[in-house]
Amino acid sequence: MDEWARRLIALALVIIANVAPWAVGRLFGRRLRTPLDFGLRFRDGSAVLGDHKTWRGLIAGAIACGLAAQLVGLGFALGAAFAILSLAADAASSFVKRRLRLAPGSEYPLLDQLPEALLPLLVLSRPLGLNLIECFAIAVAFLLLDLAATRVRHA
C-alpha cells in the first residue's frame, strides 16, 4: 500500500470512529442511550462525562471502524481498537469540559478534535505505517474537516 493510501485510510478511520456514534444517535434518538458514566456525578456536582457519551456510541464506533479496517485489510480488531482509543480520548475531553463547566455539546476547537485523532494515530502508528509527522498532519486534517462539518452536525 502506498503512503497516500495509508494516510487516507488513517484519516478515514478517525472520521468513521467519530461519525458513527453521531449517526447512530441521529438514527436512534434517545433509545438505547445509556451514558458511559451511567449518570454519575463528580465531586464538583457536575456529570462525570455527560449524556452525550454513550455505550451505544462507543459500540457503534468500534463496529463501524472495525468493519472499515477489515475492508481495507487492516483487520477488524485494529479498527475496533482505533475507535475505542479515539472515543476514550473524546470522553477524556468531555471530562475536562465538565470540570471547566463548559456546556455539554458545545464546540471547543482543538479540545474537541485533537485528542480523539492523536491518541489512536500515535498508539497505532506502527501497524498503520505512519510516522510522527504523518500522525500530526492527519490530526490537523481531521480538525479542519470537523470544523467545516460543525453546521451539519448541529442541524
Image (cartoon, grey):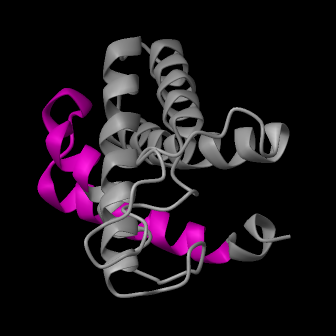
Whether residue 15 appears in magenta in the rendering, the answer is no
Q: Nearer the viewer, residue 139 or 152?
A: 152
Residue 136 appears in the figure: yes
Query: Could you say which quadrant of the image residue 136 lies in?
Result: bottom left
Q: How many marks?
A: 0
Q: From the viewer's perspective, is 21 left or right of 111?
A: right
Q: Is residue 143 above or below residue 8?
A: below
Q: Is residue 138 visible in the rendered structure shown here?
A: no
Residue at image location 42% in from the left, 87% down from the top: 101
Q: Where, by quadrant of the figure, is residue 153 drawn? A: bottom right
Point out residue 34 in the picture as x, y percentages from the top left corner: 58, 39
Quadrant (top left/top right/bottom left/bottom right) for the C terminus: bottom right
Horizontally, residue 137 falls left or right of residue 40, namely: left
Q: Is residue 104 above or below residue 4?
A: below
Residue 122 counted in the magenta span: yes
* Percent position of residue 123, x then y: 15, 42
User: In x, y percent, where is residue 24?
Assistant: 72, 38
Give 16 or 49, whichever is nearer the viewer: 49
Q: Look at the image and tell me in which quarter the N terminus lies.
A: top left
Q: Is residue 112 above or below residue 25?
A: below
Q: Main secondary structure of the magenta part?
A: helix
Rendering quarter of residue 69: top left
Residue 155's place in the image compared with 88, above or below, is: below
Residue 121 is left or right of residue 57, and the answer is left
Q: Where are the magenta residues, as a range?
A: 119-148
Residue at the spot 57% in from the left edge and 57% down from the top edge? 51
Image coordinates for residue 144, horizontal then vertical, percent:
52, 74
**Residue under the point 45% across and 37% down:** 9
